[in-house]
Amino acid sequence: MNKLIINGGVPISGMVRAAGSKNAVLPILAGTLLADGVTQIRNIPHLHDVTTTMELLGRMGVQLTIGEKMCIEVDSSKIENTFAPYELVKTMRASILVLGPLLARHGSAEVSLPGGCAIGARPVNLHLMGLEAMGADISVEEGYIRAKADRLKGAQIVMDQVSVTGTENLMMAAALAEGISVIENAAREPEVVDLADFINAMGGKIKGAGTDTITIEGVERLQGCDYSVLPDRIETGTYLVAAAITGGKVLVKDTNPQLLDAVLAKLEEAGAIIDTGDDWIELDMEGRKPESVNIRTAPYPAFPTDMQAQFCALNAVAAGTGSVTETVFENRFMHIQEMVRMGADIHLEGNTAIIKGVNNLNAAPVMATDLRASASLILAGLVAQGETVVERIYHIDRGYDHIEEKLACLGARIRRTTN
Ligand code: UD1
């Protein structure tokens, strides 16, 4: 099984390019199911979740061609079936994103229920409730969501809870529905905006993405287009924390600083000197140790839950005591026990981790439990004394593009082994 071996203690230094956003490319690839004709998607990150999505679309009969320079050509004009099997959905919850587009364009879909996952129950009730409001007939049988509709009808939908993929699924369904849909209490994440921009580039009529009220005027058909995926703000933030935690200096290029306001504010509070341009961010720690920060996760534009684990690692070696409160997912602290095994001083009080910074972390064999937890253990390994072995790194390959190559280019002593 693949492992990462990290010899810590080297400050991160240099320049790295941010890849396309995982959480934007997955809904956009699902959104190609809405189009007649060929769509070119650019700035595709090299991720296992992208491969899984391509396999999912391929099994439906979608024609996919990998081009040069991180580009994929997708032809969804004819498909053979509208089935998303358990064996693929169980490896990637975002597979649920095919439900809305299949139903809207083909009138039926059979998609496996994603089930639980390490970070919490993560139900899909909001997705189903919204599609039913648009007239879909939905049943859940034998672990599968079976949905049918003649033509979806525009509806007024109030989301009980802010859901990113829930908003995206309903926005895609509404794009081809008859009439106008309004999604209230919609997610405001930049990836929702990117999907809306993509659908509009195909001829859709979506307004208000990026606010909590999105209005979608359904159209008869959408056409293929040429679209470039936005940069990954979580990958960007992870490299910034890598520099902050090691007292180093990094310049992340091909990114967008405007998507990281809450994260940059916390890094500055931790003592980092930050400079930004239109598409780059430089963080300089000037060799200093970070100061502890208090974090509370919440939907965008607040501090992202996907950066929570990385800031636990930062606080673990910072000066002072910091608290990290997780409000989005109920069980997203599995990295804490692994960090404690590396010598971190952390205790949990409900959904808050109280983290007292220690002078040094010590290397240990650790196990990744989910995507962002894996990233946080790698960060801890970069600053720990000795050789850290991170196991179960298939999680990291789901969502980080060439992570060990990128960190190695920044001076980290990190390598992958297969035994
Ligand atoms: C997306 C992101 C993930 C990120 C999360 C929160 C993708 C592919 N993944 O996940 O990286 O961590 O947003 O920013 O974009 N909920 C319900 N019922 C539903 C749907 C959600 O109760 O039908 C709850 C969830 O259990 C969770 C909260 O709502 O507690 C937010 O989840 P949601 O925004 O839906 O997360 P995802 O879209 O799965």
Image (cartoon, rainbow, N blue to C red):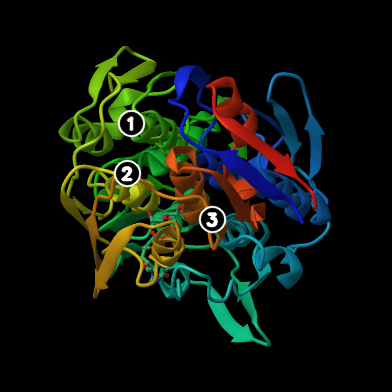
* The N terminus lies in quadrant: bottom right
Q: Which mark is residue 244?
A: 1
Q: Is residue 352 left or right of residue 400?
A: left
Residue 393 rendering spot, x and y as whole percentages: 64, 52
Residue 100 rendering spot, x and y as whole percentages: 55, 59
Chain-order first, disc 2 or disc 3: 2
Residue 372 rendering spot, x and y as whole percentages: 47, 52
- Label 1 close to label 3 by CB (< 8 Å): no
The residue closer to the viewer here, 38 or 119, is 119
Q: Quadrant of ligand 1?
A: bottom left
Write down the quadrant of residue 109 in the picture: bottom right
Residue 142 rendering spot, x and y as whole percentages: 68, 87
Q: CA distance from mark 1 to mark 3?
A: 21 Å
Query: Tag 3, which secondary structure?
Result: loop
Task: Give the amino acid type for the residue marked by disc 3 in the picture.
Answer: Ala
Q: CA distance from mark 1 to mark 2?
A: 8 Å
Chain-order first, disc 1 or disc 3: 1
Which residue is painted at 60% across and 26% down in the image? 408
Q: Is residue 210 above or below residue 323?
A: above
Which residue is painted at 45% across and 19% down in the image? 13
- Label 1 close to label 2 by CB (< 8 Å): yes
Which residue is painted at 44% across and 72% down in the image? 120
Query: Tag 2, which secondary structure?
Result: helix
Is any part of residue 346 visible from this angle?
A: yes
Query: Tag 1, which secondary structure?
Result: helix
Task: Give the amino acid type for the residue marked by disc 1 in the picture.
Answer: Ala
Task: Give the amino acid type for the residue marked by disc 2 in the picture.
Answer: Leu
Q: Where does label 2 land, which residue?
A: 314
Q: Where does label 3 land, which residue?
A: 364
Q: Is residue 54 above or below residue 92?
A: above
Which residue is painted at 79% across and 46% down in the image? 62
